[in-house]
Amino acid sequence: MHTDDQGDVEGTRDVTIITGGDVITMNPARDILKGGAVAMRGTEIVGVGATSDTRRAFPGATELDARGCVITPGLISGHHHLTGDPLVRSCLPDNLDSGTKTFGWSVPLHAQHTPADDEMSAVLSCGESATRGVTTMIEAGTVAHPDRVAAGALRVGTRLGLGTWGWDAPDQPFAYPAREVLARIGAVLDAYPPGGLVTGWVTLVGHDLATEELLVGAADLARSRGVRMTMHMSPGENDSISYLATTGRRPLVYLEDIGVMGDHLLLAHCLYIDDAEIEVLLRTDTAVAWCPWGGLRSGSGVVANTRHAELFQRGLRIGLGCDTVNSGDSVDLLRAGALASGLSKDAYRDAAALVSHDVLEMITIRGARAVGLADRIGSLEVGKRADVVVHDASGWHWTPRGDIVTQLVWSSDGQSVRDVFVDGRMIVRGGECLTVDLNGIREEANRMSVALLARTGIELPHKWPETIAD
């Protein structure tokens, strides 16, 4: 039994204990406590152990019965687009490559997003993510209205690494000179300093859409401010082709040569990388967020090119991301975890390449390392923030009870989530978001979606004809 103190009844009435569940701690020993308990006071975890011991340590505490449930740390999505897509979910045809999707759909949609659209998009994505057990997301880059995205995340109560999309590529929409991009990023860092639920990140679009001046300036800004940086890189082969043509080097080799790589940096995707680039990642302690559904939906050659299992086995800081709801169309990290495992097994023709326990690490403690928060979240340990998920394990997919990690990843998914706490605050109960009435905003979200598509001028292509039946 681990606690931060022993208190009398009066001194522990402000403690909440989740009791009787099977606790997957993700601590260094990877202990699983059958019939265990997690105690929370304020924003912190103050006890993890047997239910009987925890009750004795905190007499008079409020209890939440989790018998028949599995308890995990909050899940972490290392690459997650909160704007541009949530209002047009599954509207993009699934026969488009990533370049056509980005410049034919996503960029025009971003151009028409109002401040209200950005906030609604964030509310929808953060709210649904919370009901799937995702408590931390790293925003891939908000184009125009980061304050409204922050407001949406705070309404729901989830953690968010927030950036404003930056690039200085010539003749591109939303492109600005490097100094102006860095100034806009700096304003976000000023508004959301480290320590809060919403924290500012240095966020570039990435790919081949930034000059050396912007890349180096962004890395210097992240290091000088003690914050994290993220951008897209090599989800397909175009980035490598472009960098070889313009610099004579592959992307990650070039980025190391100019001093951009390092432990401040989280790269999204990294599907098309070679041996030399893998060594760069490991040598510089640069992190990766893999989004398996996004590459699969775009036909990016995931099985033929993924080396993420190798990155995991070699100790890289690597996590998973949900990307966008038009590239996988789901915010369910457990679903992404099962896919990542299956793709890796098939790619390496090795059932042990990336197993359920590995991917659970990628969406908890290894994911926390990737986003620079392993000292605060990612495991259920005394002193860490009280980000806790209770999964209802009473369904047939949990019967009979076997290896609960394997069942969680392969047999279950985020729909089994019952209760969610972030910083000790319950934001989901019984599978329903408590902080935002997601059902109540459905009609408003639908109206905003229709208006957004109308402003953009995009007509939805339907594979089969749709007619009004009444």
Image (cartoon, helix red, strand yellow):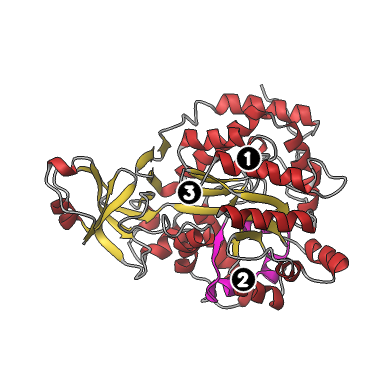
Image position, residue 341 (x, y; %): 54, 66
| Callout 3–callout 2 Cβ contact below 8 Å | no
- Kindly report the distance in space between the C-alpha atoms of the residues bearing marks 3 and 1: 27 Å
Badge 3 or badge 1: first in the primary sequence: 3
For the residue marked with disc 2, what is the amino acid? Answer: Thr
Secondary structure under badge 1? Answer: helix
Mark 2 lies on a secondary structure that is helix
Which residue is identified by label 1? 187
Q: Earlier in the sequence, mark 3 or mark 2?
A: 3
Q: Residues within 10 Å of mark 1 (few under 14, many from 20)?
A: few
Hey, what amino acid is under mark 1?
Ala
Per the image, the residue denoted by label 2 is: 284
Percent across and percent down for residue 253 are 73, 71
Looking at the image, can residue 164 be seen?
no
Residue 446: x, y in percent?
62, 28
Q: Is residue 8 above or below residue 447?
A: below
Q: How many marks?
A: 3
Q: Is residue 412 magenta?
A: no
Magenta span covers which residues?
291-320
Q: Quadrant of the C terminus?
A: top right
The residue pinned by badge 3 equals: 134
